[in-house]
Image (tube, rainbow, N blue to C red):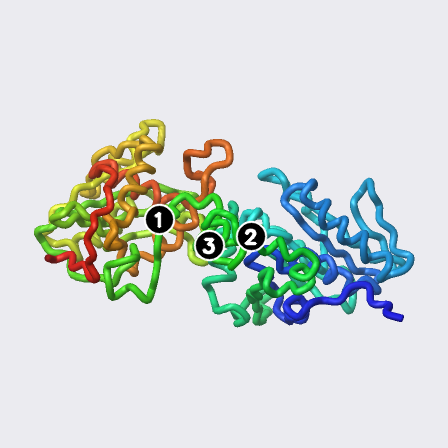
């Protein structure tokens, strides 16, 4: 008689066997992600000190996880009981598995002072980096012989797409551990050194033989979706997903030697005859950015340099530099690298706000350091459309803007922008949108009309011709 309650499929088994502290599983729909993290939570329920929690962003979304647990927990562990009012499982040993949610901006503070040996996030891209990292501080052993670790699942898209992609997807190839050292010194001089690891294990509906067997139409459902959804949910494409603002964006490293089919190119020496611009978006607790653009004889724009004020190792956290410090850095860069070039400055209109700063306006502080700007236009919808016009490719695969591959913050943040859920025509401003804002100011100062694709077939575009 077969007494097996649940058996992982090969990809699920690979995910559940990983030794790394953080493991992200999935990337596409239908890979059995939720089943895996629900089953994994049972691993230590024989230990009376074991506490686990499985998160979804909102509690209604938790119901699917709870239903999955109701199918296997009390069958796998006789005597286990589910508390329907408090949403947790109690096991005969005294171990507990909770279901949690963080629907609001400060909901993560509800978990202050609590501890969990196993923390899992279902659909991690629905959470902010702040929420995730705060819960890591709640991940600790509350007794002996407990393994302490984090597990998560995700599909591309959502408010957390950018930081999840940066943390797990682009940091290393799938299945390759990402190593980072922790070195801490206590007040009495003791040193604590350790190595931590995280890894991404991809899965898709093609890895879920049970689903393909039980519901072969599901594959057709995914394949018939609009292209962006199809790429994300069927194939786990992290560069194409629902809600992405700039679906035109293409970053192909293999194309860095050419100018067709990509926005990102290898650097070249900007001719002195091209007009140059400096576009600036101010930030203090959030990052600031200064972009240097050049415009060629056809009106095509090139982002060839940038200064990005982001705290080391942090996403969307500013350096808290005073305006004078930023201005001096800009001045130093231009003194060393732009000697003899005339540069037109365009900046965030907010730096003219007279209520900011005790030493006059921010713009006045810049001007005292010899850095000058004109006030940028803050029309958000028109500015966004200018970005679309610039990114659009003609039939030869040539856009009206390029970015040097050395401008890494821009390349990282622009494709990760998603639409605001409450203002569906605008970018979600809670994201790392500072390079986007600076780009808008520059494009609004150099507007173009929508282009119609021309029936030309160029295989190489030379910007100097």
Q: Residue at x 16, y 59 (%)?
A: 462
Q: Residue at x 21, y 47 (%)?
A: 454
Left or right of 144? Residue 456 is left
User: Residue 203: where, in percent of width, then height?
Assistant: 58, 63
Sequence-earlier tag: 2 or 1: 2
- Is 164 situated above or below 8? above
Quadrant where the image shows the N terminus: bottom right
Please say if the residues under marks 2 and 1 sit with CB atoms less than 8 Å apart: no
Mark 1 residue element? loop
Mark 2 residue element? helix
Q: Nearer the viewer, mark 2 or mark 1?
A: 2
Q: Residue at x 77, y 49 (%)?
A: 67
Circle 2 residue: 222
Disc 3 crowd rating (10 Å Cα; few below 14, some 14-19, many 20+) is few
Sequence-earlier tag: 3 or 1: 1
| Residue toward you, 68 or 364 | 68
User: Residue 189: where, in percent of width, then height?
Assistant: 57, 67
Separation of residues labelled 3 and 1 (CA atoms): 27 Å
Sequence-earlier tag: 2 or 3: 2
Separation of residues labelled 2 and 3 (CA atoms): 35 Å
- Is 44 situated above or below 346? below
The answer to which quarter of the image holds residue 47 is bottom right
Left or right of 336? Residue 38 is right
Disc 1 crowd rating (10 Å Cα; few below 14, some 14-19, many 20+) is some
Left or right of 240? Residue 255 is left
User: Residue 168: where, in percent of width, then height?
Assistant: 52, 61
Can residue 462 be seen here? The reply is yes
Left or right of 416? Residue 194 is right
Circle 1 residue: 248
Q: Which mark is residue 314?
A: 3
């Amino acid at each position: 008689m077969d007494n097996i309650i649940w058996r992982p499929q090969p990809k699920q088994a690979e995910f559940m066997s990983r030794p790394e502290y953080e493991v992200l599983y999935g990337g596409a729909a239908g890979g059995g992600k939720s089943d895996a993290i629900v089953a994994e939570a049972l691993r230590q329920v024989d230990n009376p000190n074991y506490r686990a929690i499985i998160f979804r962003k909102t509690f209604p979304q938790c119901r699917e996880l709870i239903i999955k647990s109701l199918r296997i927990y009390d069958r796998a562990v006789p005597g286990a009981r589910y508390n329907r009012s408090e949403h947790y499982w109690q096991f005969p040993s005294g171990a507990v598995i909770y279901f949690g949610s963080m629907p609001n901006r400060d909901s993560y503070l509800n978990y202050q002072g609590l501890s969990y040996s196993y923390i899992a996030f279902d659909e991690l891209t629905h959470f902010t980096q702040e929420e995730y990292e705060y819960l890591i501080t709640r991940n600790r052993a509350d007794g002996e012989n407990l393994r302490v670790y984090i597990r998560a699942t995700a599909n591309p898209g959502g408010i957390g797409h950018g930081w999840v992609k940066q943390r797990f997807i682009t940091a290393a190839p799938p299945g390759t551990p990402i190593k980072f050292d922790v070195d801490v010194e206590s007040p009495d001089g003791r040193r604590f050194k350790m190595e931590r690891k995280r890894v991404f294990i991809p899965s898709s509906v093609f890895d879920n033989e049970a689903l393909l067997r039980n519901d072969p139409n599901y594959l057709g459902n995914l394949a018939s979706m609009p292209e962006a959804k199809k790429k994300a949910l069927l194939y786990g494409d992290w560069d194409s997903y629902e809600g992405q603002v700039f679906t035109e964006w293409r970053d192909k490293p293999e194309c860095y030697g050419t100018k067709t089919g990509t926005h990102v190119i290898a650097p070249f020496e900007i001719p002195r005859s091209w007009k140059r611009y400096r576009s600036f978006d101010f930030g203090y607790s959030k990052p600031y950015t200064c972009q240097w653009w050049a415009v060629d004889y056809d009106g095509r724009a090139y982002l060839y340099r940038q200064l990005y004020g982001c705290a080391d190792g942090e996403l969307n956290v500013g350096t808290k530099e005073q305006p004078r410090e930023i201005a001096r850095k800009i001045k130093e860069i231009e003194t060393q690298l732009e000697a003899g070039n005339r540069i037109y400055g365009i900046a965030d209109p907010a730096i003219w706000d007279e209520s900011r700063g005790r030493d006059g306006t921010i713009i006045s502080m810049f001007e005292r350091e010899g850095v000058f700007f004109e006030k940028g236009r803050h029309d958000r919808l028109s500015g966004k459309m200018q970005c679309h016009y610039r990114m659009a490719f003609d039939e030869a695969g040539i856009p009206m803007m390029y970015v040097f591959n050395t401008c890494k913050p821009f390349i990282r943040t622009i494709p990760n922008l998603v639409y605001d859920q409450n203002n569906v025509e605008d970018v979600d401003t809670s994201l790392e949108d500072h390079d986007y804002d600076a780009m808008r100011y520059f494009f609004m100062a150099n507007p173009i009309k929508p282009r119609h694709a021309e029936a030309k077939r160029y295989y190489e575009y030379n910007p100097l011709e």
